[in-house]
Amino acid sequence: MSTADTQEQEYEVAIIGGGIMGTALFSELVRAGINCVLLEASDDVSNGSTKGNSGIIHSGYDPMPNSLMAKFNVAGNKMYKAMCKRLSVGYKSCGTLVVAREEEKEKLNLLMERGKTNGVPSLKIITDPLLHQMEPNLIDEIKYGLYAPTAGIVSPYLVCVALAEEGVINGGIVLKEFLVDKAEKNSEYYTIYGNSGKENEKKVNAKYIVNCAGAGADKVNTIFGLPSTPCIYVKGVYILLDKSQNNFVHRPIFPLPTALGKGVLAIPTIHGNVMFGPTAHECEPFDTSVDVESLNEIKAKIATAVKQPNFRKTIKLFAGVRNKCGNDFVIKKAEQIEHYFYTLGIQSPGLTSAPAIAQYLCQELIKDGIKTKKIKLKVRKPYPDLTEMDAKSLKKVIKENPDYGKIICRCEGVSLGEIKDVLNSPLKPRTVDAVKRRIRTTMGRCQGSFCLPKIIKIISTVCDIPKEEVSLCGEGSEFIVGDIKQNGYFEKIKETKKMVKQVRKN
Amino acid sequence: MDIICIRCPIGCHLHIEKDKNNNVVVTGNSCPRGAEYGKQEMIAPMRTITTIKATKKGTISLRTSKDVPKKLYFEILKTIKDEPLKNSYKPNDIFIKNICNTDADITVTNVNEN
Amino acid sequence: MKTDVLVIGGGPAGIASAISASKTGAKTTIVEREYRLGGILNQCIHNGFGLHYFGVELTGPEYAQRFIKMLEDCENVTIKCNSSVTDISQDNNGEYNVQVTSPNGFEIIKAKSIILSMGCRERPAGAINLVGDRCAGIFSAGCAQSIVNLQGKMIGKRIVILGSGDIGLIMARRLTCEGAKVLGVYEIMDHCGGLARNVTQCLLDFDIPLHLSTTVTKVLGKKRVRGVTVAPVEMGKPIYEKEELIKCDTLLLSVGLIPETELLDKFNLEPLPVTSSFAVDEYLQTSKDGIFVAGNVLHVNDLVDNVSHEGERAGHYAGLFAQGKLTRQNAIEIKHDEHIRYTSPKYIYPGGEGEVPISFRVDKEYRKVSILVKSGNEIIARKPAPVVTAGELQILNVEKSKVKSDLNIVIESMIKE
């Protein structure tokens, strides 16, 4: 469908924001036969808080009883394993462990009680010798652990991508690089504009709007004429170690939570890395920069729970920003305008809660007049992962398509065939980071220093764009500025003489 | 002029100047090779130039077949840039003979296809 | 497929190993993931290679091609390009099973001995705690070199280089000649990491400033680098109060090399901590029989000529091992004083014929010293050195016949009191 066609069409629902909340809702509505468009500001889904969090599917002991967080956390947790199976994405039922010292035992018991009140099953307190058998890298002072077996870990951005793809293959539309900045309403529908007034202005018409724009949601509300809601933005920094450290912990380890949040954790990732974080400091809405103080804070805080990790194996530092609106989720139908719903403050446990909130919002939309339709569900296919195949399957796959035998990302074992599959996948990713989130190219121990030149070449060839247009994450983040000039130029700099003395310090 | 000798790892600090008879005098060296290097650097510094030329399918890497005067560095790069491409190359082909009258050739060292 | 010796990595160490192994009569296979042999030399278009080995200064590709020609002339050698090793295991009778993926298919090659010659990777931004934004425009120097030299494309217009090792210096020159403005090379240590010749030929020739005891403290830029902050360093710590902003669109990182040893992680070989690699004996064999290591993956070399010599040794002994002609007997550990950070090999077999080259690095610069190799109370080798630098790899040849019960390498000052 051409861009022009998609913009002329009137949709029943426009979802603003392609994070885990928006894509979960997108998939939910499309599967209910509702005609849906998802508007994403950046070059890909999952580009906001969804790609910068711990990837934990919480069991639900942490939120305050009777809060929306408690309700949707527990409900979402129950849905996750089956949802991941349906989407063919990984889910690891490793459980989580909140650890405590001798004097903190009471606090741990209170947490367990809270969990029971919230309806979390199977919580139990673990002591030694089992505790340190389960997690040998806990420090000796840790005597108790609250074990939540219904918790798990996922790749949060991959779940988000899979939900978006499921929606697209079943008839939903995703429009990327659509930064909503203007909205109008007539008696029939809303008209939503992106990049308004510019050359690449886009617009769509939709009867119902659901604002799931995360850190941008409050701004979007004001574009629709709603008042601004007081919220803050909280940055969480993480330190990621390479796969050689994958046995450091076997499940996410939490300190006791405080008023400030869940604290700094030790988290195994589903791909076999381990990471430490997040911090929690107020920041500007989209500031994902990492600072030295945060790194020091992470290292100091995890030392209260686990032994010293081998930080020399650090391969990446990153940060995500969550939108915090008081102490609970804000999930509302607007009073001032019709057919408009919004979510704010979808911080932790947002990842876990998203599918449950999506179901709830779908019900609210039906109450507001939307009709559903039964559709024949097309199943989302996973990207082939050659590292999971046995010898026989590998031989067959490579024989049918030799591109699967050409390894491009050596650290993560990704072949040319897999990269081409991703470039042709339903959302048609075009950037290095979008490809990375789907099949882990440049995520390994060399962080792309070997494969980036090849990936730029591949994206350029397969997507038929000049190398100068291949980018990290959309316009403005291109790698290549042009051809080699083959004739240099240089300006004389006064420091030359000073430098001679400096070069060899005696 | 003051430079660091690059003939061996010691890296003597050489001081080079012309005396009243216009002879080049080198001080600070620990051996004759250093004196020779210093003298050459003052009179006519020489360099081997290596570079790349883009081709239709990728690049070819090039070198001067021997040291050339440093002052011709960018002129040589420009001449290489302006030289039209042939259909194909292989290592050791002569790309340009006698570049800028230096008696050195530009030879192909490698062919890199995309 | 069965082979006697399997060489993993077709760069200079691998090619020399394969030539040498085949000369022992062993059936040799070399596996290389790129479409051609040569390894990193293919993108090192500058000269400075081969002065020791061939007596003439060559560019990287020229050096590689001479060795490739020698390899192609060998009998008994199979060359597999476009092939990646994904796993190595050992079966019950001691043979190694090496999984290889290529467009031709997936196969398991059985080998009696393997030589790991996969070189190094560059240290990434995350590993040096580089803070700030994570935008486009941050490249490791080798990655930039590949794009510029092999694809003919430019990666930026205003460039800051962090790290004064040779690769950073070489790229400073390359990028200037291809039209960029290199604003400066920043080095956290108080001395330059690269060779003096490269300071002259890459920085001074092009008026590119070198800032020692200075580091990049932060990267700024949402989508693409817009600037970096730099600060002077004292006792290894940046002085943030003296931070300065430099507007640029590219940051090149030349901050160290890490040996690619991960394929052998599962074997729990004896490590050599200072090098982040393995301890080997004089045959360049690891603590596991039949696994040999050569080149940058064993320790970062300065001269490719030495890499070739190392490869030749490893290939020779791996070839003998595969034919059942190599045994280990009575190894002694090579000890050293506190001025020396490590030696490779770590073990030597006393007595016998021939010489063993022992490589080592010192902990800081020494002038007017003598490097002594002692066995018992006897000095069996001595090398006077007007200067030894911390960065440079030193090599001493030791006669095996003179090695008795122990070996110790020490540094003595030649300046009399």
Image: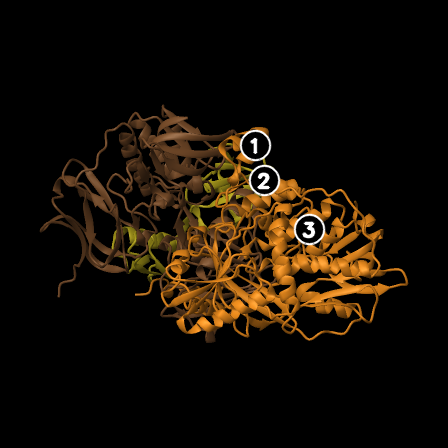
Q: Badge 1 is on which residue? A: A397
**Residue A48 image position (x, y, % from top left):** 63, 60
Q: Are marks 3 and 1 in contact (CB under 8 Å)?
A: no
Q: Quadrant of residue C1?
A: top left
Q: Are marks 2 and 1 in contact (CB under 8 Å)?
A: yes
Chain for colour brown: C
Q: Earlier in the sequence, mark 3 or mark 1?
A: 3
Q: Badge 3 is on which residue? A: A164
| Quadrant position of the N terminus of chain A in the picture | top right
Type of amino acid under label 3: Ala
**Residue C116 image position (x, y, % from top left):** 36, 39
Badge 2: residue crowd in 10 Å (few <14, some 14–19, many ≥20): some
| Quadrant position of the C terminus of chain A in the picture | bottom left
Residue B96 visible in this rendered orientation of the protein: no
Residue drawn at 31 percent across, 41 percent down: C52
Residue A100 visible in this rendered orientation of the protein: yes
Type of amino acid under label 2: Pro
Q: Chain of mark 1?
A: A
Looking at the rendered structure, the secondary structure element under dot 2 is loop
